[in-house]
Image (tube, grey):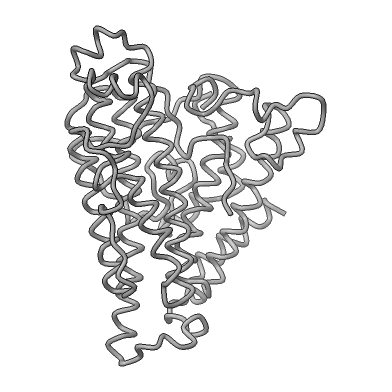
Amino acid sequence: MNNYISYDWYRNAKMNSFPNMNLLAPKESYEKGNLFKDLYSQYKNYRPATLKPRNEQESKLYELSAIAFAAHELNLYLDLHPEDQSMLALFNDYRRKSNELTREYEEKYGPLNISSNSLDGNNFTWATDPWPWEGKNV
Amino acid sequence: MFSYNKRLQYPLNITKKDLRMAKYLVTQYGGSNGELGAALRYLNQRLTMPDDKGKALLTDIGTEELAHVEMLETMIYQLMKDATLEEIKEAGLDAHYAEHAKALFPTDASGVPFTTSYFATTGDPLADISEDMAAEQKARAVYENLIDLTDDPDVIGPLLWLRQREIVHYARFKELFEYYEKKLRNGNNEFADKAKQTFKYNNDDDIMLQQLHLDNNEFFM
């Protein structure tokens, strides 16, 4: 469960083929709190927490959160550099992947957004599923 | 408008109650350098930013700060929820209990309630953005103080993460500040057609970046 972003994802994204690029892979970026390598600043000797999902649901949630976080980091960059086509293309890759993972998660575990199609049916799970602060999912 | 995502931006799972830490952490909820002030500061200043860059960045960072407000609320809630009345008194939270029981309330660590005087708007982009830069640095410093005050890894992890977000936001604001400063120094006070004139930042020559995109695209298609 610990490797919540699958090996296949890494292999296909080929992040490691580009060691000089100034971007971290989504999982590492999510754990550190930044996508752009040169913006990371360690506090004293503290290391970022390693996220350890306790079950399949958490694993899926961390995975989509990591990709969504990478897209958000590119979002902030693009606000200042809207003409950067390479970054825009990468943003769109992450955005699409994040939407896909969100849809899969919602189908299996319930809605993250009130617009989710997982609300089709007889149960209004938006209101009856646990809330994020309750720590029952995350 | 805003819509809610029913998940935290970064996971929180604090199982050890710690009222003392809850009492300190609340300052990043409702204190002068806290997340609530940050969210309101940016979402208020954004309307009079002179160009699309400023409007976009303040909207998106302001929105992220709302997600950080939720993280702080969650941390405080999880640290307090199992406390007994005796423990609340012992931790010096009896005054809080008198008014709020175990409910949350945005104050600083000394109990001073949140106030909008914690942030400013001058309508001047250089003044407003430099306030935003200072706000991010102060919030970073407070997160470091808070990290120093605990040894619970379930609290330290999220605080390190939030601290790093301050560093990223500061860097983005600084970039925007320098861009505006350059524009103003050139005597262009009107910021006319700002959205069309982009900072010459071009990754088209970056072959590795293009290759990364191509490889990614194969996978995502």
Taking the view exactly as shown, the residue that stands out farthest to the front is B99
Residue B42, horizontal then vertical, whole percent:
39, 59
Identity of the residue drawn at 38% across and 16% down? B81
Residue A9, horizontal then vertical, whole percent:
60, 42
A16, B202: nearer the viewer: B202
Taking the view exactly as shown, the residue that stands out farthest to the bottom is B187
In the shown orientation, is residue A129 left or right of residue B123? right
In the shown orientation, is residue B81 left or right of residue B136? right
B45, B7: nearer the viewer: B45
Q: Picture quarter containing residue A30?
A: top left
A19, B56: nearer the viewer: B56
Residue B52, horizontal then vertical, whole percent:
49, 73
Q: State whether residue B58 is above or below residue A26.
A: below
Q: State whether residue B115 is above or below residue B104.
A: below
Q: State whether residue A96 is above or below residue A109.
A: below
Identity of the residue drawn at 42% across and 52% down? A35
Identity of the residue drawn at 57% across and 40% down? B5
Q: Count the numbered circles shown.
A: 0
- Quadrant placement of the N terminus of chain B: bottom right
